[in-house]
Image (tube, grey):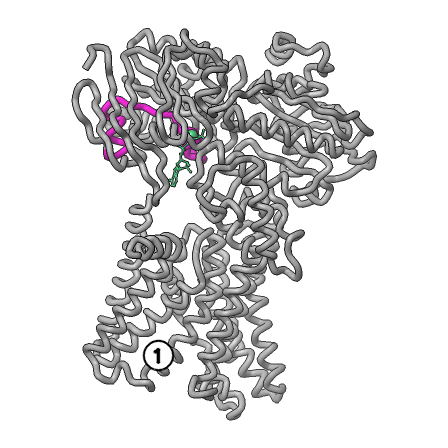
Amino acid sequence: MEENTVLIMSRIRKEFQGVIALSDVNFVLKKGEIHVLLGENGAGKSTLVKILSGAYQMTNGEIFLFNKQVYIKSPGQAQELGIGIIYQELNLIPYLTAAENIFLGREITNKFGIIDKKGAIESSKKILKELGSEINCDIPVINFGIAQQQMIEVAKALSLDAKILIMDEPTSALSDTEVKQLFKMIRDLKQRGVSVIYISHRLDELFEIGDRVTVLRDGVVVGTKDISETTKTELIKMMVNRELTEHFPKRNVLIGEEILRVENLSKKNGITNINFTLKRSEVLGIAGLLGSGRTELARAIFGIDKYDSGNIYLRRKLQKIKSPKDAINQRIGFITEDRKSQGLVLILSVKENISLTNLTSISGFGFINSKEEKKEAEEFINRLKIKTSTLDQKVIYLSGGNQQKVVLAKWLSKKADIFIFDEPTRGIDVAGKVEIYNLINQLAEEGVGIIMISSELPEILGMSDRIIVMNNKKIAVEIPIKSASQELIMKYAIGA
Amino acid sequence: MQSVLEMITKQLLIHNGRQLGTLLGLVLVISVFAFLSPYFLTLSNLVNITQQTSINAIMAVGMTFVIITAGIDLSVGSIMAFSGIILADSIQNGIAEPIAIIIGLSVGTICGLSNGILISYGKLPPFIATLGMMSVARGAALLYSQGRPISGFTEEFRFLATGQIIGIPTSVWIMISLYVIAYILLNKTVLGRYTYAIGGNETAANLSGINTKLFKTIVYGISGLLSASAAVILTARLNSAQPIAGIMYELDAIAAVVIGGTSLLGGEGKISGTLIGALIMGVLRNGLNLMGVSSFIQQIVIGLVIILAVLIDMSLKKRRN
Ligand SMILES: Nc1ncnc2c1ncn2[C@@H]1O[C@H](COP(=O)(O)OP(=O)(O)OP(=O)(O)O)[C@@H](O)[C@H]1O
Ligand SMILES: [Mg+2]
């Protein structure tokens, strides 16, 4: 074994009830390197790191840590071995505070065994501040959106003092500024000799932060490369086994009449004085930093949270939307950012999740037409290339990206006039993204008005007809696509 | 050939593993008693067991719906007693029996719907709301009957429990019909699907446009209706309605559901499992009685069986991951 090698995973195999998730995978991690894992949705990335973190037991294979063979039986044991992980799906305990979550299982106590609450809050604040984030560490995390929760997860992992740190899509809901801060901290860790395994579908990030990259496809290693010696095109080719020409397919449609108008919409602690319109066949992009009020705006329009003042006009008529059911009856669809807690019923099947929004229209006298239900689910599975063993597989057993595709399918099976997408491509691979952009375009061509909230600026720039930038709960600026640029959006997002 | 067989068993195990496990449990318990007591496997005893089981089995149907929504209903025993008293009193007051039955069933349903309204719209935890109803309905039954049983009914009414159709007791026919209806509701209808969705993730269900409050209320209403159905059969069988009937029945119903593999966390569960669970409890009681085991020891045995069933369930689930 080379001197600077910290971890060798050798001939790893993992089966789930007959489904082979990994076969014969070899993976080597060096000291102080940032090693990127890349691959399509369902390629086996999360499975591989979960074996390392003790969440899964491998079917076959060997793991050597610092030249010694180890048998990792539980997450606790992995932590003792110096392996820290941020899971793809957020794992915070909803009714504990940020500080309590960060120090969960490692509580700081005084000599009487009493938890030092102040100390925990101070330390948490410090880490979060280094990450450039002002989060109230003393209220339950259930109050935070997905991006803030992701930030707390990152802080938790950083505070672990791990020798190997695994990050499974830590940035999927973060915007550029937060990502920059995170990368600064990762580089600090690297300086201190910590090795990082980094998973992301945002290809640009890899070139910024990674040293080496290992590409997985269908549970097999396609190859390992030095980042400096490879290109995006080559990596995509390795991942999906074909060329990908267009990243943002063009739309061919004229923008129609007004379908939604929001006037002076305000909600205490949520949004202030929001005004905008949306037209048929238009894609309106909403950009902004974490906590800027984008999701709050969507939730207010969809009737989840009550707003204090302001008006919403649908098809030029004043409407009061009091509940999601009202919104759906008014032909609005809302694809939420948090698939685990809001989007999916994880223990139901792929088919049952897809049909959930649409059940009444495929049933008569309360009886579900199961043929129709199957047909529709199959259609979406093919169209979005959802990787699942059967229609009846429980969604919880799908990979993160494939779960996200199920959320989209669930809503796209419902006919609507307005769709609000909140981080629609979170966790979806490059090829899958193009598939989803095609679907959004098709909707626009059918006359649907689309609001797309996204933290990925290339996506906002590539897909929108018009862009709204939010800052501190307000609309900072509205930019026509012709004059928009990454720099301009960031300028307003930060509030400069 | 062998591999095909292996594959089929594997698939069966993956999809119905839990049901098969419970069924095996039932077969095991039956075999043990058949071995220990020559009388156990006689036709008359088997008929006896199903008849004894029917009350608990019927209440467990409603409990299955409730537990799938991640709720609990502690009031089923009291609701049974109360609707039984109302039913009996109506008959005694000269109301035609079919109408009296409808009145009894309505009373149970209304109690159940009240539970549902308190839980959905009053935002009370199911445990608290139904604990309250447990006391209220019991008190109402005692008050209405002045604490005295109401006895003496016509042969036609008693036929509902004591009669036989092609050799099988009417109460068993009723039980079977209710299970078939429940199976269809849970597996083929929108109501059933929403029941699972609400238990699996209420937020996601709500955001999908499902009126979760309404459907939760309906589910508790169903539980009340089934408790009242059990009351009809019990009254007919005993030829008497007792205000103190059904004490602790809620625990038997919960036990049948849990032994049958429905998760208390909600979102999962099968009605067929509940039937098997109820039968296991019935067989145990009957067998232990036949062997002259004291009721004290019976309680211990049944408690251990519940724990064992769930233990096995948990370890099977873990193995599968
Ligand atoms: N607990 C499980 N039970 C059954 N199958 C599983 C389980 N976990 C993962 N799988 C399957 O294993 C395969 C690999 O999944 P994994 O989560 O590792 O993918 P991934 O590369 O992380 O994808 P993504 O980019 O979407 O997160 C998938 O086909 C998935 O369906
Ligand atoms: Mg993953």
Q: State the extent of the magenta-drawn residues as a range.
A: A73-97
Principal secondary structure, stretch drawn in magenta: loop
What residue does disc 1 label?
A: B49
Whether residue A455 is situated above or below residue A439 in the rendered picture: above
Looking at the rendered image, the quarter that the N terminus of chain A falls into is top left
Whether residue B26 is situated above or below residue B1 in the rendered picture: below
Whether residue A449 is situated above or below residue B37 in the rendered picture: above
Residue lying at the far front of the rendered structure = B1
- Disc 1 residue: CB within 8 Å of ligand 1: no
Residue at image location 26% in from the left, 79% down from the top:
B289
On the image, the x and y values in percent for residue B124 come to 52, 51
Residue A397 figure quarter:
top left
On the image, the x and y values in percent for residue B270 come to 44, 60
On the image, the x and y values in percent for residue B320 come to 32, 46
| Of the pair A174 and A378, the residue shown nearer to us | A378
Whether residue A282 is situated above or below residue B280 in the rendered picture: above
Looking at the rendered image, the quarter that the C terminus of chain A falls into is top right
